Image: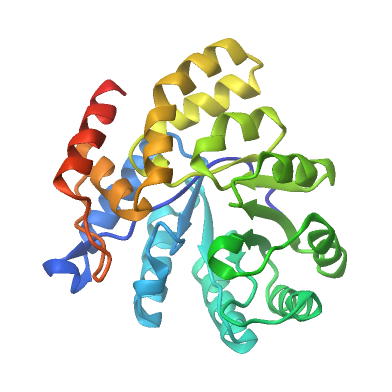
Amino acid sequence: MTDLAGICVPVCTPFSNGGAQLDEAALLGHLDAMLAAGVHIIALCGGTGEFPFLSEAEKRRVIELGCGHIDGRAKVVAQTSAIRTEDGIEASKHAEGAGADCLLVLPPYFEGPDADGVLWHYERVAASVSCEVMAYNIPQYSDFDVTPELFARIRKASGNVTCIKDSTGDMLRLEQLVATGARVFNGADYLNLYGLVAGCAGCFSGSGNAMPAQLVKLYDLVMAGKLEAAAALWGRLRPAAVFFSTHAFNPAIKAATEMAGRPLGECRLPVQPLAPAERAALAEIMAAI
């Protein structure tokens, strides 16, 4: 097991030709920027990577390309969620074989199972691989809440389900999960500082696409106990985190990353780009950072 910790950036998936195909060169360049910034963990095919809009072949290509390029220079998390357990097992085996250190797995979504069924799903996916598995809790999209009590059951039943990404945006929930002794990753960008101070192992932060070095610095300051300096840095980063969390997230992240000098194309349709007024407001925030 890898004891994952630090800043995890779920990287955007770049597209070319109006979203018709993957832009592999842009992806590799973007990964290099994450590595140069000292990002501890890179997540492939996460929500910020637009996985619902990728074909199965594209997801496998991104994971293979990303794992091969990163080549041990950072830890790699690959998102392998599926509604059918059989599909989740197949995707998980592929990602582990490609070199992923950890798998990010949602409970089955869209009229999915009850808690016992979710436990069954995690047990079987985890048993199919040897690497770590990170439970992914984002009930606003999956329509299922992996509560601290259920997560404790999942951890007990599956020895390699070692950590959880919690994207509820609920600070109390983060506190409750941390109290279980599990490794918890905050998945709501506007809680990055607070989650680290509360004892989260790290942040799973889409905003890292646009500001990776700043988030690594934030993590380092908190780990060093330099909370006054961390709060001052967060004061500069917070407006962007709030913007991302109150606008269409993926288009905002891609726009901010372009403003940081790394154009990754627009989101794949039907997801629309930011409106001109929104983009102008974001440009002011990014200029201040």
Which of the 4 image quarters holds residue 246? top left
> Which residue is at the front of the view, 127 or 264?
264
Quick check: 105 left or right of 150? left
- Tell me residue 266's x, y (percent): 21, 58
Which of the 4 image quarters holds residue 151? bottom right
Residue 220, above or below 52: above
Quarter placement of the C terminus: top left
> Which residue is at the front of the view, 21 or 169?
169
Identify the residue shown where x is 76% and y is 63%.
160
- Tell me residue 168's x, y (percent): 61, 51
> Which residue is at the front of the view, 95 or 272?
272
- Tell me residue 238's x, y (percent): 44, 28
Quick check: 259 left or right of 181? left
Identify the residue shown where x is 75% and y is 39%.
175
Identify the residue shown where x is 12% and y is 68%.
17
Residue 108, above or below 278: below
